[in-house]
Image: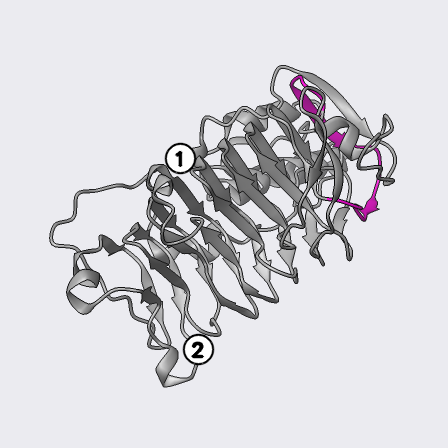
Amino acid sequence: MAFPCLVSVLVFLSVIGSCFSYERDNLIDSCWRGDRNWQKNRMKLADCAVGFGSSAMGGKGGAFYTVTSPNDDPVNPAPGTLRYGATRERPLWIIFGGNMNIKLKMPLYIAGYKTIDGRGAEVHIGNGGPCLFMRNSNHVIIHGLHVHGCTTSVFGNVLISESSGVVPVYPQDGDAITVRISTNIWVDHNTLSNCTDGLVDVTLASTAVTISNNHFFDHDEVMLLGHNDSFLDDIVMKVTVAFNHFGPNCMQRMPRARFGHIHVANNYYEPWGKYAIGGSSHPTIISEGNMFIAPNESYKKEVTIRVGCTSSNCDAWEWRSIHDVFLNGAHFIQSGKEYTGGESFKAESGKEVPTLTRHAGALKCVPFTHCL
């Protein structure tokens, strides 16, 4: 008769162990990832962002739209395809009916108030075609996708949205995720690699953006924040880069910033090829609670690179390191005469980064259990 008691004890220990395993999740994951009924509570995710993009609503409050086909028609998308859902003029929470490999024929323009939620399926986008594009979009969440192998597009007609209609679009660079003239954007828990240009580009006065919990690897120019050195409108840009895992085989731009205000917090950096964090045109960069592991080469130990400035000008840029951890000789050259703050959320010490980033990338989510 001791067997039922043993079962009860094991169940109790399992519950306690489950609680313990989630108590040290980062701020975003502790908000939702411990919910075994995540598939019934998908829209809870929209309450969990931190940083400058924390107000991104995505498709919260709208209907669910299920992608059932990987096919793509850039001009007249069929219901059930990703492009059809992404271009509707109403809030939608887009989910996937099964595992998919989607090769887009033209960049996928995502209209405002959309969540693209890959949880519960393994969704790959790219595969030798162009990828995801936001322009004049507000309140977009991109979560749980594998985006890789994105290539440049050709000149052609594309449906931008129901209201904008079909317009001719010039070739795009081959980024995994492009954000232009957009606000309240959250890119979370995606796995990104090996594209023709960047993995995430935020430019043309986009602001209120959080890029979090992603795994970036096998790529040269990872993340660009700011259009060019003469585009002054990017001074409004505010971007949080948090809880991401950079590496292996990331060369540079993690991120590279122009103008704007960038909070880089609690990220894990494997050895870089050229540098980790760079910039030009005097951006404000607050590096807080990151873990930097330098390459073995002695001339690559410096975390940062400043471009296009004299020594005196560079010294005036506000670049600060707070509670970062530096391994294998990594070091960060600070600048700015007086620290004036600028953190977008309360980060933890860099010592906690291996724990905080251990689930970076697209998660495996199975109904009635935690996403792992």
Q: Is residue 92 magenta?
A: yes
Residue at image location 75% in from the left, 44% down from the top? 106
State the mark number for residue 52.
1
**Tag 1: amino acid:** Phe
| Relative vertical location of residue 25 with respect to residue 298 in this rendering, above or below | above
The mark closer to the camera, 2 or 1, is 1
Instruction: Please indicate, yes or no, whether residue 33 appears anywhere in the rendered image.
Output: no
- In the image, residue 136 lies at what x, y percent? 55, 30
- In the image, what residue occupies the spot 83% across and 44% down? 100
Callout 2, which amino acid? Pro
The picture quadrant where one finds residue 132 is top right
Dot 2 falls on a residue whose secondary structure is loop
Task: Specify the quadrant of the image occupied by residue 275.
Answer: bottom left
- Please name the colour scheme applied to the rendered image: one colour
- Residue 24 x, y percent position in the rendering: 46, 44
Most foreground residue, 184 or 235: 235
State left or right for residue 186 relative to residue 343: right
- Tell me if residue 358 comes above or below residue 61 in the rendering: below
Local packing at callout 1 (Cα closer than 10 Å; few below 14, some 14-19, many 20+) is many
Q: Is residue 240 left or right of residue 261?
A: right
Specify start and end residues of the magenta stretch as a single range: 88-106
What is the x, y in percent for residue 11? 67, 36
Specify the quadrant that holds the N terminus. top right
2 or 1: tag closer to the N-terminus: 1
Residue 90 in the image: above or below residue 133: above
Q: Which residue is mark 2?
A: 295
Q: Is residue 358 shown above or below 139?
A: below
